[in-house]
Amino acid sequence: MRKKGPTNHFWLVLGTLNVLVMVYPIVLVCRADRVDAQLLATFVLIVAILLLAVADTISILVADVIGGTNRGDKQRKIRPD
């Protein structure tokens, strides 16, 4: 029996969310004009990267566990004859 993992739809959604979450910190870094604004924007970017790494790891593990169970398969009950 083959274990099912995350589907292509899962990877598409995860990648899209990662790009959308990273847009704001990158825009902050690009628009920062003072040194303190650059430091804050860089800090926000680093925190966003770390949070995404943790969230991605958890979501991949959860998707692997959920994908491993075959919900469509019905278990056969063995009746004593």
Image (cartoon, rainbow, N blue to C red):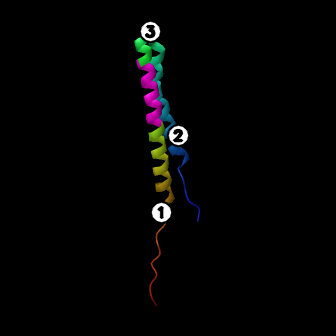
Measuring from the top left, give residue 35's x and y in whole percent.
44, 11
Residue 24 appears in the picture as rendered? no
Say which residue label 3 marks.
33
Alpha-carbon span between mark 2 and mark 3: 34 Å
Report the quarter where the N terminus lies: bottom right
Q: In the image, what residue occupies the spot 46% across and 45% down?
A: 59
User: Residue placed farthest to the right in the image?
Assistant: 2
Q: Find numbered disc 3 in the image and state the secondary structure of the residue it sits on.
A: loop
Q: Which residue is mark 1?
A: 72
Q: Label 1 to label 2, Cα distance in Å?
A: 23 Å
The residue range painted magenta reads 40-52
Looking at the image, which residue is at 53% across and 50% down? 6
Query: Where does residue 68 sit, x and y in percent of width and height?
Result: 51, 58
Q: Is residue 55 visible?
A: yes
Front-most of residues 9 and 17: 17
Q: Badge 2: how crowded within 10 Å, few (<14), some, or many (20+)? A: few
Please tell me whether residue 59 is drawn above or below residue 2 in the rendered image.
above
Q: Nearer the viewer, mark 1 or mark 3?
A: 3
- Reply above or below: 81 against 29: below
Q: Is residue 41 in the magenta section?
A: yes
In the rendered structure, find residue 16 and report the number of the disc placed on it: none
The secondary structure that most of the magenta stretch takes on is helix
Tell me the element at label 1: loop
Question: In the rendered structure, which disc, 2 or 3, sits on the residue that comes first in sequence?
Answer: 2
- Label pair 1/2, CB-CB below 8 angstroms: no
Decide whether residue 54 is among the magenta residues: no
Residue at mark 2: 12
Residue located 48% across and 61% down the image = 69
